[in-house]
Image: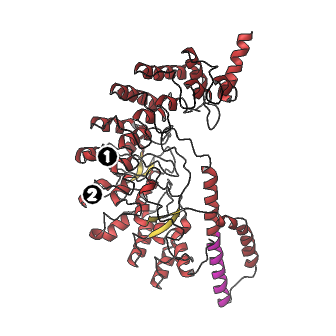
Amino acid sequence: MVPEVQDITALELYEAVGEGRIDRVESLLAAGVDPNARFDNLGSVFTGVAEDWASEDKSARPPLFNPDQTEQPSLRRATGESEGSCSYLDKPKATRLMNALLKHGADPYALYRQPILKYRYVRLYPGQTRDEEVDDEATDLDQICFARRGIMEKALRLERKRRNLEQGVYDPNRDEFISDFEGSLDDVIKYLDLPINYGVRSVIHALLEGGMFVQPIFDFLGDTLDVERRDPQGRTLFLTACRSRVGPDAATSGVYGGLSTINYDTGIHENPSLQPENPWREFEAKNSKACTGPTFLSFSIARGADLLAVDNYGNNALHLLFTYTDCAWIGLPPPIDTTLAHLIETCPSLINQPDKAGTYPLHLAIWQMNSIMIPARDSPASIYHFETAVDALLAANADTAVRDGRGNTVLHYLAGSRLGEKDRMGDEQRRFLRRFLEDGVDPRARNAEGMTALEIFCTVSYDEFGDEGFYDRYFAIGQYVIGQFEKAGYDIQETNSKGQTLLHLVAGLTAPEGMSWAAWPWFQLLRSKGLDPMAKDGEGKTPIDIAEENESINVWLQEERESMAA
């Protein structure tokens, strides 16, 4: 639907807030502009929102929002931050803006629409392939946002023209500029006809989840703050903080933008964490600011928050601690050690509690190890030690025999993650492989798609640079992993429902970008173990047929043939 500006004063307030023009904001509010009013012709925030958008049926794939500022209330915009952004925040200015809006009745629990992404940047479970359409969808949504923004700009320009004409100060040369602007708008207005799936967010929950500045709202509401208020997805403030970009271990005054740096060599602007041993201490500069106040965890406890709460999808606090990466932006993983330890000690029932899709916290803790590939040079290496969360759950008697709703075991989660990688995370996952097999997890178990963990392992690509020695390293890793499965009773000659052997799967191993450097070493390894390269699958294809169509293997296969011919 093409939006129409029906309340120009509400739009002017929205614009002034976004630009941080405090005097103009206070002037508009004093004149009676409603801080909760929408400026467009949308009849309700639920317009275009499916009734079941956040129902239990979405548990296996909970909705993920794509931020659209043009749909946000003024109070949400007052922080001046974008979700996932690591940019400097002027807290005093944001505080003054938010207080002005709150004093004039801005609703911190107000609901507003946001587009829901159909596709994901990250894989959600073992065996899932990356959504190739994700980039096209993101481009379309950006164009829709740009078009809506253009309509807003046009309305503001026309209003300024009207007022200038009334005052006799209008410059007719501006008409040409407006005409050029309208011409560029015509190029994107067509995107507003694209179908969009919408969900609904709450202002305070969105700020919490995005790791944005929420302290002024806490201070303004004081004892009247409803800590058990749930957003449309059933998340309380504590559950939302567990999914936050800064994490529940951060100070309530901490923001994700505090991790921004003027210069990577001079340290972070502000450390959102308070713990003496928190990972970001080493990056503090002499001029770094210190956050104040309690952590989100201690704040929630002091307010009597229900730490056992679950959302619409059955996610408890432990689930959400490990799902912060299920978002449109991948960034710095938040420290969660203090909250994790507290929940394990005081709420042990959460440890072996599945969500409504059958996924357990242990599954997600393992899957989290796949979320961040290489530590950034401007972040502490210790925040990427995801194995500590898995170790903590195992020490608290997390059940290693559990399967998720798709039939995946903990072995499937390892196999679909970093099990075959040559980095430190891969080493840790191979440590867990030994542990799980020793615990008796069945290596032959097939998930709902009919795949074993080892079959998934043979379909996961690693496309880092093929530096010198890559062949020997990947060969050794494959030899170790496959050997562990064999030792536990796995028959590597077994075929799947399509008649494919492990060699068929490795022969088709590709990478989204470049070559899969593990493909050729593992192809060679499996051949050396007796798998027949001429065995036909259900479609009559042999591993050699598949390999000849795969650049990651065919170049080496041709080289091998030439060497043998010579």
Q: Which residues are magenta?
A: 150-167
Of mark 1 and mark 2, the one earlier in the sequence is 2
- Kindly identify which numbered label has been placed on residue 306: 2
Residue 284, percent across and down? Answer: 41, 46
Residue in view at x 58 percent, y 17 percent: 527
Colour scheme used in the picture?
secondary structure
Residue in view at x 46 percent, y 42 percent: 379
Residue in view at x 61 percent, y 73 percent: 3
Please name the amino acid that badge 2 sits on. Answer: Asp
- Kindly identify which numbered label has been placed on residue 421: none
Query: How would you rate the neighbour count of disc 2 (Cα within 10 Å): few for under 14, some for 14-19, many for 20 or more?
Result: some
Kindly report the distance in space between the C-alpha atoms of the residues bearing marks 1 and 2.
Answer: 16 Å
Please name the amino acid that badge 1 sits on. Answer: Gln
Q: 77 or 453, which is in the foreground?
A: 453
Q: 206 or 173, which is in the foreground?
A: 206
In the rendered image, the residue lying farthest to the top is 566
The residue mark sitting in front, 1 or 2, is 1
Magenta run includes residue 160: yes
Q: Which residue is mark 1?
A: 353
Element type where label 1 sits in the image: loop
Q: Image quadrant of residue 195?
A: bottom right
**Left or right: 162 in relation to 15:** right
- The image shows residue 459, relative to residue 162, as above or below, that is above
Res 213 seen here: no
Q: 265 or 566, which is in the foreground?
A: 566
Element type where label 2 sits in the image: loop
Query: How would you rate the neighbour count of disc 1 (Cα within 10 Å): few for under 14, some for 14-19, many for 20 or more?
Result: some
Res 171 seen here: yes
Residue 458, percent across and down? Answer: 54, 29
